[in-house]
Amino acid sequence: MQDRAHPNYFDLLDVPRRYDLEIEQLAENYRRLQAQVHPDRFAQADPAERRASMQLATQANDAYRTLKDPVSRGQYLLELNGYDPATADRKMDTAFLEQQMTLRANLEEIPQLSEPLDRLDQLREQLAEQVKNRQLRLADTFNSLDPANLAQASNLVRELQFLDKLRQEAEELEEQLL
Amino acid sequence: MAYSDKVLDHYNNPRNVGSFDKGDDSVGTGMVGAPACGDVMKLQIKVNDDGVIEDARFKTYGCGSAIASSSLLTELVKGKNLDQATKIRNSDIAEELALPPVKIHCSVLAEDAIKAAIADYREKHGATQPEAAVSQG
């Protein structure tokens, strides 16, 4: 699965291969690696070395961007575990989708309410709780190392994608209200 | 990206927005969603005693193409029986609305929605017809 041209992102940034990462450690390792491969340090180097350092800098960017985001980190771990999302059952849990509908409707109504910013804060707290809940379950699922759990992990990642969309919509609404 | 006139028409004047009582025996409800864009779509059909879809409602949170796809779908299914409605393909919707390739998935979502609604109705009526709510992308 790994080769020199495409190292594993976890190894590249020297963090353990798990969902519940220490984000601060990830950021620190990323900054250290970027400093090591900074183009200024290779100004006098030969072209091959310069190219290699630039390639590493690009990979470090990709790795950091992928691992720091809760959704793409989950997708990447699924990929590393050999899970093909194309084979995933696309059907989402009806109760979850209904809840999404309700939250979207609630969000839509906020501008017409009194104290809309307070209402928006409440909704965002609710959202943050749901995101946290899924991230904890996702960490448990990946840590259990049972291949049968990958479908469940994939479902949790997809739920996070919906919640992320709601978060974006809530942010846009806040900008409109302010 | 520019929307086609038909998409804009359905987006600005969506047909059959709303909902039926999902507990009603004559109603089939399809809830579907697309994780990549966060779209959520609810499609409901009201089926008469002859097995013909006499009315439909939808509620969609998503982009203009997703709203237009589900709005058009409610028009397409009215007057069809369940077997005919099962045969509606996402390409029928995509062509009618002139959806660009990046928006084809919105019409796929609409096809999934009508299949899920029909499956729900049939399940209520004890039909032993498991519906594979999966379509060719």
Image: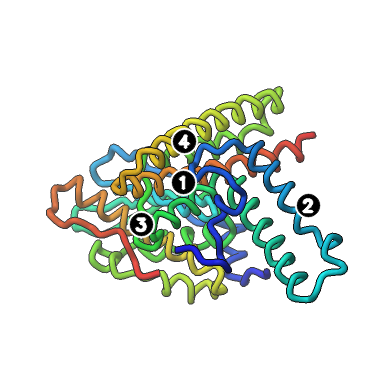
- Quarter of the image holding residue A80? bottom left
Which of the 4 quarters of the picture holds residue A86? bottom left
Quarter occupied by residue A172: top right
**B35 vs A35, nearest the viewer:** A35
Residue topped by disc 3: A88
Q: Chain of mark 1?
A: A
Task: Decide: few, some or many residues near mark 2? Use Cα within 10 Å; few <14, some 14-19, many ≥20.
Answer: few
In depth, the one of A30 and A77 nearer the eye is A30
Whether tag 1 and tag 2 are in contact, CB under 8 A, the answer is no
The residue that appears at 55% across and 50% down in the rendered structure is A10
The residue tagged 2 is A35
Q: Is residue B31 left or right of residue B2?
A: left
The mark nearer the N terminus, 3 or 1, is: 3
Left or right? Give the position of B121 relative to A120. Answer: left
What's the residue type where badge 3 is placed? Answer: Ala
**Amino acid type at image mark 4:** Arg
Between the C-alphas of marks 3 and 4, the distance is: 18 Å
The residue carrying mark 4 is A134
Give the SS element for disc 2. helix
The amino acid type of the residue labelled 2 equals Ala
Q: Position of residue A19 (x, y in %)?
A: 49, 41
Residue B11 percent coordinates (x, y): 59, 59
Please, which chain is the residue tagged with disc 4 on?
A
Callout 1: helix, strand or loop?
Answer: helix
Report, in whole angstroms, how far the alpha carbon at label 1 lies from the one at label 2: 32 Å
Q: Are marks 2 and 4 in contact (CB under 8 Å)?
A: no
- Residue at x 40% of width, y 51% of height: B32
On the question of residue B67 being in view, the answer is no
For marks 4 and 1, give the CA distance: 8 Å
Check if mark 3's residue and mark 1's residue have beta carbons within 8 Å.
no
Q: On residue A157, which mark appears?
A: 1
Mark toward the viewer: 2 or 4: 2
